[in-house]
């Protein structure tokens, strides 16, 4: 894995610490290593964090004053929300200022009839979902990390997750943003309009910019009618072509009611069943591939289950599925979802793991996985690909675990070779080397190759306009 370089210019003096403490309050300017620890420890233990100070501003105005001061002194600042990012973007690695938005937690307004809510960046995704739910509305962004990740991080990474098939990724769920720029100026773009063709779309630049262009402090999010019913099924498949055929059938039969289609290899299910307490295989026997399907209905009139049953019946008649179970209760549906969502924690006992979060056109997923499997076997015989896919939107988490018995260090030394080989196939299939986790530090080296010189030049120029002194998250993305 490539390591970032630090471009920090200024140094933190006792006077500056006092200046920051005067802005956010002494108890929210953390220099004690024990107090800093939760902000520095990274979820996958891939990066070591080191910050000169952790600042926890309590308002947009405080964020603005912090950045004004940091910019004046050329101090690098790493924005952080829930610290669940998977590419190291939120990690301070060179003693930067770590700016946590976690105290910005207000739901500023909720408009059930206009189907919008304005929330601050430190609200966890689960809290945002609950706020919508309390108003009988749905905020459909949904990730396994939703209890910890926060809206600011979700938007800064343009998060994806399991609802993208029906509702789009984070970018599609935002109408407006409030952003503090590197020099402390506050851009109020809290637009609530669906139609606004007044020049360049600035908000779309900040979404997915991973803390390199500005600090998102609040957002206007889109809400949706809350489904009154859901139906969930777990099916067994002989191969990936069957998965593609089933997905296509589900689209034809259930159309907009088809809200999730997740696919996983046998090894994913086996790993989850062995390592997650209470998880069990819902189908008899063992099958090469499994899919989780979900349909929704706005009224509680059985539409969701009928559409799901129709899809499975048609698939069975055409020999597409080998076996299937439909959840008969909410608890059963939750258990099926848990098989999909707990794979990240379940995978740890398998040892070293090389991560690829990529996407290809949906119809190319079978070819991508076949070619990637062959490439991994060439590079590291016995390596265990663990593909798990938000299939319906083309996203494959193509993780590769070390061969049994191999030393972890030896395997992890193959990281760059394996990632490079996977990305070659992805680009050959007109895919993307980062589907939903972003670039951060992990994928910086590969970005230039994937985007080409013109796109890189434009991105660098945009960065220079928004952050001329280069204080925001230096060494990340670009
Ligand atoms: P952080 O990790 O704190 O930050 C992420 C990036 O955003 C960093 O570059 C940071 O500098 C920047 N940033 C944070 N806050 C701000 C802000 N206010 N303004 C500007 N920049 C900011 N991701 C998916 O997309 N789909 C998944 O299905 C998914 N599943 C996951 C499952 C698990 C178990 C885990 C641990 C992670 C998963 N992730 C997934 C990754 C992660 O949860 C998402 O990227 C999430 O959106 C990050 O949010 P966060 O609040 O934790 O951000
Ligand atoms: Zn994912």
Image: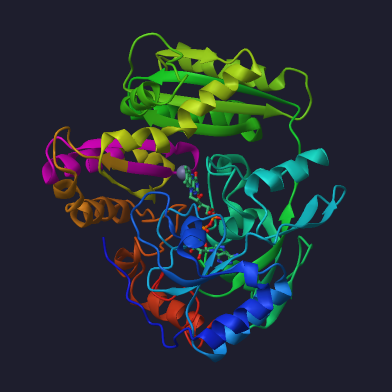
Q: In the picture, which quadrant includes the N terminus?
A: bottom left
Instruction: Report if residue 385 lies within the magenta region.
Output: yes
Choose top left, top right, bottom left or bottom right for residue 352.
top left
Residue positioned 79% across, 63% down in the render: 193
The residue lying at 59 percent from left, 25 percent from top is: 253
Is 94 on the left or on the right of 471, as rendered? left
Of the pair 226 and 180, the residue shown nearer to us: 180
Give residue 185's quadrant in the image.
bottom right
Residue 201 seen in the current view: no
**Residue lying at the far bottom of the rendered structure:** 72
Q: Residue at x 75, y 68 (%)?
A: 190
Q: Position of residue 107 (x, y in %)?
A: 78, 55
Q: Magenta segment: does it hold 138?
A: no
Give the magenta-colored segment's residue range.
369-398
Is residue 60 depicted above or below 260 in this figure? Answer: below
The image quadrant where one finds the C terminus is: bottom left
Q: Position of residue 31 (x, y in %)?
A: 51, 70
Q: Residue furthest right?
A: 113
Up/down of 184 relative to 211, above or below: below
Q: Would residue 91 appear left or right of 164 to someone viewing this image?
A: left
Residue situated in front as seen by the camera: 346 or 476:
346
Furthest-top residue in this view:
284
User: Which of these two is toward me, 464 or 456?
Assistant: 464
Residue 10 coordinates in the image, percent (x, y): 45, 88
The reply to whether residue 93 is visible in this rendering is yes
């Amino acid at each position: 894995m490539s390591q970032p370089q630090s471009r920090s210019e200024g140094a933190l003096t006792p006077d500056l610490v006092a200046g920051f403490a005067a802005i956010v309050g002494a108890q929210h300017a953390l220099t004690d290593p024990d107090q800093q620890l939760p902000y520095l420890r990274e979820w996958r233990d891939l990066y070591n964090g080191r910050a000169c100070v952790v600042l926890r501003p309590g308002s947009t105005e405080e964020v603005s004053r912090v950045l004004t001061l940091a910019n004046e002194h050329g101090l690098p600042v790493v924005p952080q929300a829930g610290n669940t990012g998977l590419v190291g973007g939120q990690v301070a690695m060179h003693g930067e200022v770590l700016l946590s938005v976690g105290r910005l937690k207000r739901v500023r307004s909720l408009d059930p009839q206009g189907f919008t809510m304005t929330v601050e960046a430190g609200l966890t995704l689960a809290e945002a979902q609950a706020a919508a739910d309390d108003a009988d509305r749905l905020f459909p962004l949904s990730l396994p990390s939703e209890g910890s990740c926060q809206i600011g991080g979700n938007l800064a990474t343009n998060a994806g997750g399991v609802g993208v098939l029906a509702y789009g990724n984070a970018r599609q769920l935002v109408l407006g943003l409030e952003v503090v720029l590197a020099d402390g100026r506050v851009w109020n773009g809290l637009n609530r309009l669906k139609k606004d063709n007044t020049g360049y779309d600035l908000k779309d630049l900040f979404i997915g910019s991973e803390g390199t262009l500005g600090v998102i402090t609040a957002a206007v999010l889109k809400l949706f009618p809350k489904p009154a019913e859901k139906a969930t099924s777990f099916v067994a498949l002989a191969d990936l072509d069957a998965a593609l055929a089933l997905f296509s059938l589900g689209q034809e039969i259930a159309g907009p009611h088809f809200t999730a289609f997740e696919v996983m290899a046998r090894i994913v299910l086996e790993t989850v069943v062995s390592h997650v307490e209470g998880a069990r295989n819902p189908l008899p026997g063992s099958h090469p591939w499994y899919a989780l399907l979900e349909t929704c209905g706005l009224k509680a009139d059985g539409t969701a289950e009928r559409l799901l049953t129709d899809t499975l019946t048609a698939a069975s008649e055409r020999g597409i599925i080998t076996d299937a179970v439909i959840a008969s209760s909410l608890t059963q549906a939750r258990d099926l979802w848990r098989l999909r969502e707990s794979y990240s924690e379940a995978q740890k006992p398998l040892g070293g793991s090389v991560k690829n979060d990529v996407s290809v056109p949906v119809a190319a997923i079978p070819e991508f996985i076949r070619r990637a499997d062959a490439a991994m076997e060439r590079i590291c015989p016995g390596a265990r690909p663990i593909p798990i896919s938000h299939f319906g939107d083309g996203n494959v988490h193509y993780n590769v675990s070390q061969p049994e018995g191999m030393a972890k260090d030896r395997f992890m030394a193959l990281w760059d070779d394996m990632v490079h080989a996977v990305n070659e196939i992805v680009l050959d299939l007109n895919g993307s080397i980062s589907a939903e986790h972003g670039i951060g530090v992990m994928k910086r080296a590969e970005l230039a190759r994937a985007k080409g010189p013109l796109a890189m030049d434009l991105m660098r120029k945009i960065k220079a306009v928004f952050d001329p002194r280069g204080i925001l998250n230096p060494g990340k993305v670009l």
